[in-house]
Each structure stands twice: as C-alpha cells, then as structure tokens.
Amino acid sequence: MPVHATLASVTERIVKRSLPYRQVYLSRLEIARHQGVQRSSLSCTNLAHGFAAFPPNDKLRLMQDRSPSIAIISSYNDMLSAHQPFERFPHIIKDAIRSAGGVAQFAGGTPAMCDGITQGQTGMELSLFSRDTIAMSTAIALSHNMFDAALYLGVCDKIVPGLLIGALHYGHLPAVFVPAGPMTSGMTNTEKVKIRQLYAEGKLGRAELLEAESKSYHDAGTCTFYGTANSNQMMIEAMGLHLPGAAFIMPNTPMRDALTAAAGVQALNITAQGQQYTPVGRLVDEKSIVNAIVALLATGGSTNHTLHLVAIAKAAGIVIDWDDFSALSAIVPLITRIYPNGTADVNHFHAAGGVGFVLRELLDAGLMHDDVMTILGHGLYAHCKEPVFDNDKLVWRDVPKESADKNVLRPVAEAFSVDGGLKLLQGNLGRSVIKISAVKPEHQFIEAPAVVFHSQEAFMQAFKAGQLDRDFVAVLLFQGPRANGMPELHALSPALGLLQDKGRHVALVTDGRMSGASGKVPSAIHVTPEALDAGPIGFVRDGDIVRLDAEAGILEVLVDPQVWRERTLVAPDLSANQFGMGRELFGMFRQSVGTAEEGGATFGLPQI
C-alpha cells in the first residue's frame, strides 16, 4: 500500500533538511568501513593485550583472523530490576556465537540509573546527562577497534538512547539490540494509583505505601507500565534493531534465552565478512526515524522521546524537530491503551498481539515505511512476527489477524483516537510538548491563574500547606537542561491528580521533563527556550492568566503586550545545583547542552 501523503511529505522534508549533514555522516561511515577492523594490523603486543584472557580456542581464532569478533556492551547491574537479567546474557551469547563460527567478547559496560529511584531527588539532575555519558562509554568500549559488530544490552530510559547514539558514532559496525524483557505483572495499576493518592492526602502511611509499591515492582525485569523504558523497546523494534517480537518476552524464560542466543547469531550474520552486511549507520536513516516516531505516537509513548529521538537522529546526521512529531501525530491513530493511558500493562499488551500487531496495522494503513533496512535485511513487514517454539526450535510466525483484547490493542480501523498521543504547543511562552493520550477531553483546555515555583520542593510545601486547593496552572521554572539537568517531575503527579479529582482545574507548565509515565493531568513540558536561557516562561508572574489549549496547540499567557515586553527575568540563586551528588562533574554538560527541541544533547551534528 502507498504511504500516507503526510508521512511521505514529512519524510521528504526531513531528508532535504538533513541532506548536508547526512552526506558527511555517510562519507565518514564509508571511510571507517574501508579502513576496516584493526586486528590484522595491530602489533603483536597490542593484539596480545586484546585477547590475553580469552579461552584458547577463541584466542586461536582471533590470532588467525579468520572469525568475526562480536562486541558485547551491557548496562548490567544487579541493583536495578530491568538490568539484573543481563548478568546471564554474555555466557548465552558467547556460546551461541562460538557454535556459529565466531567469537564474542564483553567489550565494556555502561552506567544505568533508574529514574524511578531518583524521582524528586537530587540524583535525578544527572539523569538526562547520563544518556550522553552512556554514549561516550559505548564509544570507549568500541575504541579498541577489534570488532566486526556489536550487541547492545539495555532496556531503560536513557540507556537505550545512549547505546544507540554511541553505536551510530561507530556507524560502520552492524548493531543488534538485546532487551531483557518486563517483570511479571504485579498489583493492578488502578489500585496503585489509588494508594498513591491516598498517601498524598495523608490517609495512608509510608509503610502501607511501601508495601503497595513493593507489590508493583517485585521481580526481575523492567517495570510493566508504558513509560520511557518500554517505549524504548517499541521504537527499537519498529526501527528493525531487535529480532521480531523480542521486546516484551519476560526474563529468565526459555524463550528469552533462545532470543538472546539468536540475536548473537544474527549479529554474526550481518558483519562485513558475511553475505548480509548491515551497518547500523545505514540502517538508521530518515525513514526508520519516522517509523520510530509513528510507533511512539500510535502507542501513546513517552514524552521523553521528543528529546531522545531528536538526539538519536542527530547522531546519524538527521535533523528532526517537534513540527515533525506534530504533523505525524495529526494522522497517526492511537491504537493501544497501556497504563498510564489505560489500566493494562505491557504483559497484557504483548498477550493481545504486541509489537508485531502494531507494526502490521500501521504498515497496512500506509502509516509506516516498509522499504527500510533492518537486521533481517530489507522490509519492515519481516518484523510483523512473533517467536514460538516448534519442536524446541525457535521459529517465527505471523502475528494473529485479530487482537486478543480490544480494550488494550485495536486495529487502525477501530482506533481509540484518530490522532496520536503527543501534541506540539506554541505561543508567547515558547514551544512545548504535551502528552494527551491519558488526558480526558474535558481537561485538555484550561485557563487559570499562574502559581510560579522555582523547585519541586516549593510546590510540595504549598500543596501540603493547603494553599493549592483551587484552580491554577503551576508554572515550574529553572528545570531546563542548562539550569539543573532537566529532571523529571513525576513526583508532582499524585498531588496534581488529587486536586484534579476533587474538581479543580489544574495544569503544569515547565521547562523541565515529566516522567514517561505522565498521565491524566495536562502538562506542557520541555518549554523552549528554558527560563535560564531568557525564555519567556521566565517572565510569568503569580496571578497571570495562562491558557493551555491542547486541541488548538496553544500555550500562552494573557498579559497586556506592553506589560509583557517590559518584564525581565528574575533568576534565583542556582549555585546549589552545581555541586553535591556528583553534579559538579557534570558542569561541562550544563554549559554545553543544547535546547530540549535539539534533543538536550551535548554533541552536535556532523560539521559540514
């Protein structure tokens, strides 16, 4: 089926906008490809360092330079549930690759922090910058130039974007991404939200809240709500960087282990020494980036990817902006209801048909590009599959024609909404994004007085003091990447949700981020320019009437133009943001970071 006219036009304008940068990127990729892997040209001393601890047979293969060598780069740690399963993966991968005639080495690890732990805490101010740190860690792991391809083991918020950004800076190498899978389902999301709001009201104590949270987050694997981590997996699969159906298979199961082994073998198949050379820098092109945006929109995914996808694209010499997201959102229907956009979790979604169903529906509707390169070759339809065992052998079959649960997953013709879950807001406060897939229509417009805050703590103090039991728009300033690293502000959600449930008209406007789990309260986030960068959001004063109209795409303050022009920025003392919890080590990030719409990145496009 021909692609939708808007999809084609958005893709074409991205191609034209990106052309000079993409040409430079691809020319560098070709230079690196022709220079080849250094194993054969290293001095004997250097090469001996590279495999000194290898098993004898693997060492012999590398000494003879006859077998492809695959790098394993992992975000494993055993503190975080999503990454703990990766402890077992290198052994599985090495055995599979060895059996297929290659060798694999654990090339390096990357940091992995959890926004669920640092929400509302000082450590969250390192979160966004951890993405670029992970990219740099990936580059260091590959810097020995001994590898023909790489396997990237990662799941959560900044980890997968960081790994992919790092991989794209080694774009001549093939890349296969290997997820760990979600934990088993725990307490229902409806009950979890209820308990959080009761705690915010002071009707439950910390012990009861902790017991409930421990029933929600209770096992190995990623959290089961559809936040940034699981949006990562959706998009990586939509880009053809996973084996089909790999995203949401639970860890420590025979199927998870079989897919992990198969990922290693596939990495071997797509090296330059094989018949299917697939460099990641060519696989990730303008069409695959558009496919990722569409998958995000169609599933009501995380707002964080209005940052991360921009940065990922930039790493490949591709320029996208929020206008692209907005144009695509207008034509892409919402076909899933996964918490916080519904009550189901990703395990229910997977059982209903999963990623393969989503991809097939969008392709059939002309809302995705099929003519893309993937780790399986050419064509995204090859990923509209689900893995099964046939006599203990891993095979793939077509996903079912019908959704197993239309409360969770629907065909395009029966979509929950005719447009996507993200909107662009513009006005005299700047540019912003809002996630509306979980916001009821009656809450998508608000016009109310501003209450200005400079910190999350100040907001919570006002809430606990009973000062916010009214209609208002919370304007939270100095939360942008330059000011304090752009922390997520999800800790405010229970309080705002409680006020909204009481009948108050409330909203949040901020130059900070909201969690990938942002939900029912209208939140204009990532406001650009940020307050510290002389953004007009910094000129808002208590009592100003703020208008947020998600349907019309408007974010503005209703102040007399002459009065507005005469206002200046009154910045608080932000020196405390510069030290403690390691923040002093990231001063260079705050000084060099780009705007939210530029991806909040500390690196730029390839220089022309």
Image: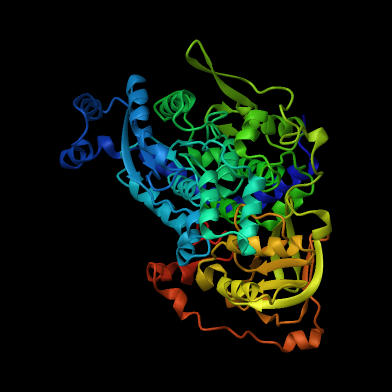
In the rendered structure, the answer to whether residue 254 lies left or right of residue 465 reads left
Give the camera-side residue of 534 and 405.
405
Residue 401 horizontal/vertical position (percent): 73, 22
The image shows residue 597, relative to residue 428, as above or below, that is above
Residue 412: where, in percent of width, then height?
Answer: 78, 35
Q: Is residue 73 left or right of residue 177?
A: left
Does any portion of residue 597 appear in the rendered image? no
Q: Residue at x 21, y 26 (%)?
A: 60
Residue 548, by quadrant, is bottom right
Residue, far left: 45
* Quadrant of res 458: bottom right
Instruction: Please give the name of the residue rendered at 19% of the width and 41% of the height, measured from the top-left corner.
Output: 49
Q: Which corner quadrant of the image does residue 97 belong to? A: top left
Image: 5 above or below 488: above
Q: Is residue 499 visible?
A: yes
Q: Is residue 258 above or below residue 165?
A: above
Q: Percent from the top left, x then y, of residue 128?
A: 50, 60
| Residue drawn at the location 38% of the way across and 41% of the way down | 73
- Across and down, in percent, residue 104 comes to 32, 31
Q: How many marks?
A: 0
* Model colouring: rainbow
Query: In this view of the protein, which residue sits in the foreground, 79 or 62?
Result: 79
